[in-house]
Structures are given as C-alpha cells and as structure tokens.
Image (cartoon, rainbow, N blue to C red):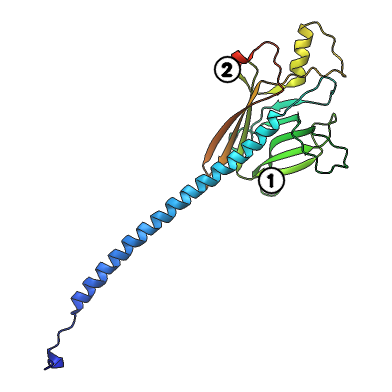
C-alpha cells in the first residue's frame, strides 16, 4: 500500500543550496585544472615555435656561411661584417659575403653556384618594427649594398649579432676580408692590386639571434659555423680545437 503524497519528504531548501554549492566548487576545480592544462600547453607550444623559428634561421645562415668563399682572381668576392646597434639597444649587425650556396633555378639563366648574400636587421616601412631580412644576388659585382632578391625571414627577431674568430683567443666584432688580406700581404712585402683579391675569411663565425617570445621577452639563441674554405695563415686545426 503506497504512502499518502503528503507524507512523502522531498529536499529542503538548505539541502538544495548545499548541493549547488558543492557542485559549484567541483566545477571551479575542474575549470581551474582545465585552464592550467591549456596554459601549460600554450606555453610549451610557444616555446617550441620559438625554438623552431630560431633553429631554421640559424641553419639557413650557417649553410650560407659554411660555403663562404673568396677567390684571388675575383675582386668582387667579399666578406664584410659591420657592428651595429638597433632599437632598444639591441645588436643590429650587417653581414655581406660571397657564397657557393646559391642554387640556380633556371638552367638557361647566366647563373652559377656563386652569389652574394646579406643578412641584416631592417625596420618595417610601416610599423618601424625590426625585420630580419636576407638579400641574395645571383651575380657578383662591386656594389655590395643593393641588388638581388630581398626576403623577410622573421618579424620576431629583434637583434642580430655576428662575431668572428681569427685563430686568437678574442672574437672580433667586425670583419673586412679584403682589409685583413691586404694587411697581411703588405707585411709579407707583396704588391697590392685591384685585380688580385687578397681577402681572408675568418675561421668561424658566431651568430646570435635575439627573438621575442609570446610575452614580449627577448630570448637569445647562438650557433657557431666553421667556414670550410677559410685558410688562416698563422693558425692550425689544433689551435682551433683548443
């Protein structure tokens, strides 16, 4: 026999409020855990993207530098590194050099594997924010300031610094291959002419990128590239290994 409806007891208002409060606390805890997981994932993803960007750029610069070349019978081949400072006192060096890393795309074009490559920080024409650019000219001439194809590598690189190893303990902040070679040739009593390129390549180049992360903080990435065709006159491989 069923009990009368009036005798059936339901939830009181206090019990309902307590249940709602407990449920709300559980939902807050679940949301906080989920939000923390999302933030952690975003942090890891941003860090991965930052490292990937820096690695790709450093690999590109390293590939070009590893094949840097200066031939004595070509006076238009250079390696000139200029020390500079850009926005927010960040390093903004410029490096222009001849390299054998050029890939001719048109077999009918008058091109070879020789090219002039330049890396530099330039301001965006509209925002004035720094841009890392690469200029490649598929021919060599005596104009080392312009010409060729300009490519924007990244809008997140706020600083670029090159240092040059000449076989001594100190790294040089700037480099002029022709000036270095002319000085050595003069010391050795050789006659200097425009037609003979005395340019000396550094043993290695240290490249430092300063990249902005998602929070606007600057993170530095550094790599060292040995120049395969460098022929320093006064140091040996054993000296470099030290």
Q: Are marks 2 and 1 in contact (CB under 8 Å)?
A: no
Q: Is residue 215 visible?
A: no
- Foreground residue, 21 or 67? 67
Secondary structure, mark 2, is helix
Say whether residue 69 is left or right of residue 211. Answer: right
Locate residue 36: give its quadrant: bottom left
Position of the C terminus, as image quadrant, is top right
Q: Which residue is mark 1?
A: 124
Position of residue 165 relative to residue 60, above or below, is above
Position of the N terminus, as image quadrant, is bottom left
Position of residue 94 relative to residue 22, above or below, is above
Locate residue 24: give its quadrant: bottom left
Q: Is residue 70 visible?
A: yes
Label 2 Cα crowd, 10 Å radius (few <14 / some 14-19 / many 20+): few
Across and down, in percent, residue 138 comes to: 81, 37
Locate residue 91: give its quadrant: top right
């Amino acid at each position: 026999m069923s009990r009368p409806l009036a005798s059936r007891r339901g939830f009181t208002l206090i019990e309902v409020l307590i249940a709602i409060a407990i449920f709300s606390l559980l939902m807050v805890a679940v949301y906080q855990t989920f939000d923390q997981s999302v933030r952690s994932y975003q942090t890891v993803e941003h860090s991965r993207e930052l490292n990937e960007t820096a690695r790709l750029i450093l690999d590109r610069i390293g590939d070009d530098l590893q094949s840097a070349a200066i031939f004595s019978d070509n006076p238009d081949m250079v390696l000139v590194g200029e020390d500079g400072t850009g926005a927010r006192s960040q390093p903004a060096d410029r490096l222009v050099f001849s390299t054998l890393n050029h890939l001719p795309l048109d077999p009918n074009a008058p091109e070879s594997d020789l090219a002039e490559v330049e890396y530099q920080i330039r301001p965006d024409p509209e925002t004035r924010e720094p841009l890392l650019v690469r200029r490649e000219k598929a021919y060599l001439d005596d104009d080392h300031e312009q010409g060729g194809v300009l490519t924007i590598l990244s809008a997140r690189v706020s600083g670029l610094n090159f240092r040059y190893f000449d076989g001594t303990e100190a790294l040089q902040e700037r480099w002029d291959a022709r000036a270095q070679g002319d000085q050595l040739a003069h010391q050795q009593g050789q006659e200097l002419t425009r037609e003979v390129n005395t340019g000396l390549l550094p043993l290695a180049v240290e490249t430092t990128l300063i990249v902005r992360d998602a929070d606007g903080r600057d993170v530095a990435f550094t790599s060292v590239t040995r120049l395969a065709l460098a022929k320093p006159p006064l140091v040996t491989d054993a000296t470099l290994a030290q």
